[in-house]
Every structure is written in structure tokens, then in C-alpha cells.
Image (cartoon, rainbow, N blue to C red):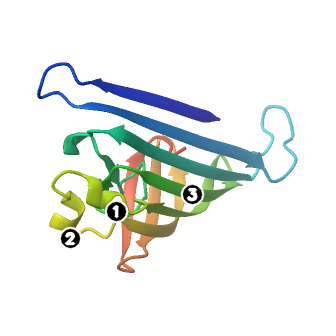
Amino acid sequence: MYFLQLDQGLGIGSKSPLFNRHQLTLTKFINLNNQEKGVGKPLPAVLVLHGHYAGCVGDLPSYDAFTLGGPYSVRGYGMGELGASRNVLEVAGEVRIPVKNTYVYGFAEHGTDLGSSKDVKGNPTEFFRRVGHGSSYGVGVKLGLVRGEYIVDHNTGAGTVFFRFGERF
């Protein structure tokens, strides 16, 4: 599965920015065992590989910068806790093991600003003393619509329990 998004700031008027933002997300689900077809058959174990790149060209306003960290970026961090940048690279791997009618999973993620935080107007990453990169790992269980996760952020080594709705991938 892939996703490509392009955003264009037209720069109409003297105070409007002219820029292009682009994002590419790739996610691959790989069955680790043969899936038996039919009602009541066990779910397959699945390996999920995920990558996300985002970048921009032009006069990007700081409020349109990419945030790094959060439940849909690098889990275990708050939204934007790792920084705001003009370029972002995120990679993740997750192994899902079926248990009865649900699954448990383990994962690892890493995100980096590729050194582009300093190019955001006002350099909010430095101003708020963010590091611009981070890794996390953890385990989780899917409980109906809710994901319960224990996540360790690698920058501080602190573990946290999170409950989220929906899927990460």
C-alpha cells in the first residue's frame, strides 16, 4: 500500500508563501504463515513494514512544518515532541501474532528530521529544546476498537501505557 500527497502554496499576494510539500508513505503487510480460508480459521501472523518521507521546497511557513513524534509518527512521544522540520523520515516494523479473536504485537520505530529543523523559520525545534530524532519500541494488544500499548521512548528510556482508537497502519 502506498500513499502520495502533494500540497502547493500558491504565493498569491505579497505576504503569501510559495512552496510545495510532498509526502510518500509505503506500508507492506507480509503474512508469516499460511492463512487458512474460511469462517473460524485462525488469523495469520503478520509482519508490517512501514516507511514515510515528507519534504518541502520553497518558503514554507513554520505552522506548515512537519511534526515529528506522536501516535501516528513515532509512538511513545507527544505530538511534535521530537521537533518540527522541513523534511522527515520515519521507519517502523511491527509483528502481529494472533491470539483467539484478536492479536498481540511488538514494534520498533524511528524518526528523524534529517537535519532540516534548523531551516524552519524561528527554529522551533531548538527553541523548545527538542532533539530532532527519536526511537521507540513496545508491545501492544488489540481490544476491539482500542489498542493498548506499552511503549518505551529510547531518548529517555521511560515507559508509558497508551490507549488509542483505530489502527496505526
State the count of labels. Answer: 3
Residue that appears at 34% across and 65% down: 132
Sequence-wise, the earlier of marks 2 and 1 is 1
Residue at the (62%, 57%) spot, across then down: 94
Which residue type does callout 2 highlight? Arg
Tell me if mark 1 has few (under 14), some (14-19) or many (20+) residues whose alpha carbon lies within 10 angstroms of its own: many
The secondary element bearing badge 1 is classed as loop
Q: Estimate the x, y position of residue 168 in percent, counting from the top left.
A: 50, 46
Determine the secondary structure under disc 3. Answer: strand
**Residue 66 appears in the figure:** yes
Question: Which one is closest to the eye, mark 3 or mark 2?
Answer: 2
Mark 3: which amino acid? Answer: Ala
Residue 14 percent location from the top left of the image? 12, 25
What is the three-letter code of the residue carrying label 1?
A: Tyr
Q: Foreground residue, 77 or 61?
A: 61
Disc nearest the viewer among 2 and 1:
2
- Which comes before the other along the chain, label 1 or label 3? 1
> CA–CA distance between discs 2 and 1?
14 Å
- The residue nearer to you, when weighing 100 against 117, is 117
**Residue 77: assigned label:** 1
What residue would you read off at disc 2?
Answer: 129
Residue annotated with mark 3: 92
- Judging depth in this view, the residue of 5 and 30 nearest the camera is 5
Q: Is residue 159 above or below residue 8?
A: below
Label 3 and label 2: CA atoms lie apart by 25 Å
Residue 99 image offset from top left, x and y in percent = 68, 55
In primary-sequence order, the first of circles 3 and 2 is 3
